[in-house]
Image (cartoon, rainbow, N blue to C red):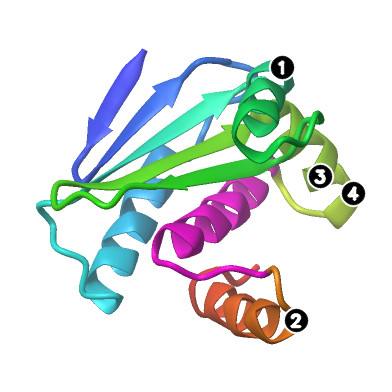
Amino acid sequence: MATTLSPITIYHQHELLPVPEIRIKQLTKKFFTREKVSTKRAVSLVFCSDYRIRKLNREYRKIDKATDVLSFCFEDDDFLGEIYISLQRVKVQAHRFGLSCDEEILRLFTHGMIHLLGYDHIKEKDRVVMEAKEQEYFKV
């Protein structure tokens, strides 16, 4: 099932948890406004299982394990990219970090959106910049 929340479309491939669609829509608008992203560009957000995200991680990153969030950036005028979030990882990490599942979903969505905007955390100096950017958008 897909829900269109312009400029974001949300797909539920794994309906383990309800997701905060209205808050995701609000956060998406905040990103698009602050980062001056054209509203002609779209984002797809896919909620999936550990199995699906592991398969994607193995295929595209050559890492054979489940992860919490993956972002795929597209060099397209109409499509910013795709974000995949494992709802099984959400449940585990929300408990570990003392967050609600909604908060963990929003935290992972924020991380994924920042990747789509071109930020990365491979090098330490880039990680510091990216974490600061995440703090601008996600506050518990």
Which mark sits nearer the N-terminus, 2 or 4? 4
Q: In this rendering, which labeled residue sits more in front, label 1 or label 2?
A: 2
Q: In this view, does 21 lie to the left or right of 128?
A: left
- N-terminal of the pair, mark 4 or mark 1, is 1
Disc count in the image? 4
Above or below 65: residue 22:
below
Q: What is the quadrant of residue 132 in the picture?
A: bottom right
Tell me the kind of residue under disc 4. Answer: Arg
Task: Tell me the kind of residue under disc 1.
Answer: Tyr
Question: Upstream in the sequence, badge 1 or badge 3?
Answer: 1
Residue that carries the numbered disc 1 in the rendered image: 51
Q: What residue type is labelled 2?
A: Glu
Q: Which of marks 1 and 2 is nearer the N terminus?
A: 1
Q: Do the residues labelled 3 and 4 touch (CB within 8 Å)?
A: yes
The quarter of the picture where the C terminus appears is: bottom right
Look at mark 4 in the image and give the residue it sits on.
96
Verify CB contact (< 8 Å) between mark 1 and mark 3: no
